[in-house]
Structures are given as structure tokens and as C-alpha cells.
Amino acid sequence: LYVIRTLESALRSYFGRGRALRRDGWETFFQDCGADRYGRISFEKLIRGMRQRLLALPGIESQDVASAVVRGVSLEEFRAIWRLFEDKGSVSAKDWALALYRAELNSWPTAVDVQLRSTVRCLKLRADRIYQSPDNWYRVFCMATENSPTIFFDELLFIVRTKIPGLSLSPRELPTDRLRMLWREMD
């Protein structure tokens, strides 16, 4: 989990500061690293691209490039992530992002029905109070989806934590692990 979060943090730094990882982040990064016309990249090319682009970011201390892929991720740790692809010669950005997402999701806590109901009730009550339109989540999700029919967990967290037009729920009022439980069940 640490390796996945470190890779995603490095990708965020590559694209500049932002509240959430870009939807096309890995796809754009793979293209920048020389992915083929099908959007696939080999292990060696991805390693070279990460070292050239992510180890050279401002604020990153120089390291022994032979042993690191990005700051905080060794070559061996990166190989372990690559093994998720069952020794394929190359991987697409879509498959890469999905595998990282699934690995992270599997590390999240599971919930019992009582916890899920409590989480949903907390979200519903706050949304009803702020938007004054019971059971209508359209306005709530419009603030983060950028005209997309999908939403990422980081965007849900942004909606929940941000002051109005968000739900402005603190981690004390609704712990992040409870949101992760809900998200894991929905996914």
C-alpha cells in the first residue's frame, strides 16, 4: 500500500499540485514515457521514464538511481507491483491504474451493515440540510465530477470534507475509514 501511495504521490507532483489525481494521469504519463501506439509500455521503458521524470522533480533529493524508481520506492518494490500483471511484457495505463486501485481497495477495511447504514445516514442528513432537497444527490456530486459519469474516491473525500458547497464533515464526525468501507462496498 505504501508503494502505491508513493507512486501516486509522485504522479501528482509530476502534474503539479491538485486536490485529486488526474483522471488521465497514468495514461498521459505513459505517453510521456514513450508508450506504443496502443498505449502499452514495457517494464524497462516505464522504469526509465519514472527515473527520468519522477526522480528529477524539484525537492527530490538525488539518490542512487540504480536502486530507486521514485523517492521511497526501490526497484524490488516496483518489480513486486509489476508482478500483478502476470509477467506480461507490457501493460496499458488503464490496466496499470486499475491494478493499483484494486490493490489499494483490497487493503481497506470491510464494514458491517450497521456501519454502512450509519455512514449513509450521516451523509444523507448533512446533504439534506445543506442542499434542502432530500434524497437528491445530483447537486452534491456535480461539484466534483467535472461532467463525468464516474467519481473517484478522492473526489468523494473532497465532497465530504470541503466546506459548502461540500458537506463539510470533519474526520471526527465521519472518519475516513468509514468512507473507505462504504466505497469498498459500492465498488
Image (cartoon, grey):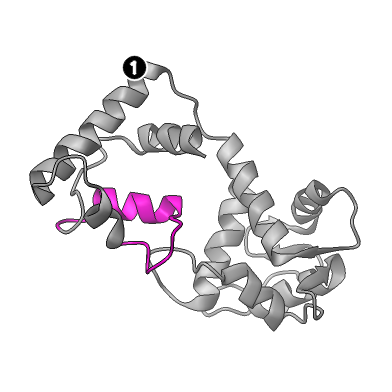
Bounds of the magenta span?
Answer: 144-164
Residue nearer the viewer, 19 or 113: 113
Q: Nearer the viewer, residue 36 or 12?
A: 36
Q: Position of residue 82 (x, y in %)?
A: 80, 54
Q: Residue at x 32, y 55 (%)?
A: 158
Residue 162 in magenta?
yes
Give the percent coordinates (x, y) of residue 87: 90, 52
Direction from residue 19 to residue 100 in the image, left or right: right
Question: Is 38 rendered above or below residue 43?
Answer: below
Identify the residue at horizontal 42%, vertical 63% (top origin).
20
Quick one: SS at disc 1? helix
Q: Is residue 163 above or below residue 66?
A: above
Q: Position of residue 143 (x, y in %)?
A: 27, 62
Q: Residue at x 22, y 46 (%)?
A: 136
Q: Amino acid at mark 1?
A: Val
167 sits left or right of 74 in the view:
left
Hey, which quadrant is residue 39 in on the image?
bottom right
Residue plotted at (34% across, 50% down) = 157
Neighbours of disc 1 within 10 Å: few (<14), some (14-19), many (20+):
few
- Residue 4: where, in percent of width, then height? 62, 52
